[in-house]
Amino acid sequence: MRRALGIALLLLMTSMHGAAAEPPRGGELRSASVHSPALGEDIQYTVYLPRGYDRDKARRFPVLYLLHGRGDSMSAWTRVKPDLDRMIARGEIPPVLAVLPDAPWSSRGNYYVDSAHTSGRAVETAFTRNLVSHVDSALRTVAARDGRLVGGYSMGGAGALRYALAHQDQFGHAVVLSPAVYTPLPPADSSVREFGAYGSGALLFDEQVYQRLNYPSLLPLLRKEMPTRLYIAVGDDEWPNPDPAEARHDIDFESAALYNAARRGPGVTAELRISNGGHDWAVWRPAFADALRHFAPTLRASCAC
């Protein structure tokens, strides 16, 4: 009798321990696409839907647009799904949607701008107009600038920064991770010069185009009545340029320069985080989670849309 009771108690304790250790049930990743008139073809994307999205038909959700780096694809950002699941379950952030678009144009080096190169594409227009409009009509989003966040790493960090500054009407928050932004021009060996994103005609890189699209030209144009919130993060072991004359263009240096310039822009609030690590997810993933917790109080979680 005692043995049977002991076994039953052991099984109960094991069951309780297993239940406690079980990770919270999370959201779902789905594949989708939308035709873009700006591109003349479809935009492929993955969308993260929080748990309960299909059940709660009356609720609307803030939406995150997450841009991948050069050479990567939309699948790169799927690694943050467990982080979203965990933070939502714990109440650290509100339930959110996340849109992970694929950007294959210009050999995956389009930097998310409208290129004037002969082989370039209107990626910026496609994403900020066609994609955003589609998502707001197809999903239950908070269709307002303070209900949208754009984030990205490396090339995607440059894209997220530009979208937040050039499209204030669309985005109120930006997570800018190890951004590939350089002032006044990128170093001679930078891939920014290679793919035609900042080109013109047959010229792969046009200095005037780059400077027109880069953030120093955008900051003075910001409207103070539209608050823009930036979270900039970088690793302290980012790749150092071997040419001492180009040290100014190391990404950690450029990120600090961006922070100091941006926080002086009209209506801009900015945070800068420097982590131990390099140009990789060991820096970006925890920084992304911290950025979401930081923005949670100002990311609108409901609307009468």
Image: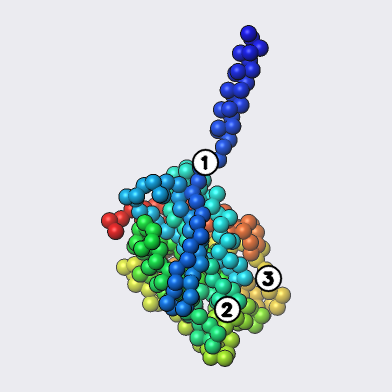
- The residues bearing labels 2 and 3 have C-alpha atoms spaced at a distance of 26 Å
Residue in the picture at 34% in, 67% down: 226
Tell us which disc is closer to us: 3 or 1: 1
Q: Residues within 10 Å of mark 2 (few under 14, many from 20)?
A: some
For residue 240, which numbered disc appears in the image? 3
Relative to 146, residue 208 above or below:
below
Name the secondary structure under disc 3.
Answer: loop
Identify which residue, 42 or 98, lies in the foreground: 42
Residue in the picture at 49% in, 49% down: 27
Identify which residue, 214 or 121, lies in the foreground: 121
For residue 106, which numbered disc appears in the image? 2
Spot occupied by residue 191 in the image (x, y as percentages of width and height): 63, 78
Q: Residues within 10 Å of mark 3 (few under 14, many from 20)?
A: some
For residue 24, which numbered disc appears in the image? 1
Residue ranking furthest to the right: 242
Q: How is the image coloured?
A: rainbow
How many labels were placed on the picture?
3
Name the secondary structure under disc 2.
Answer: helix
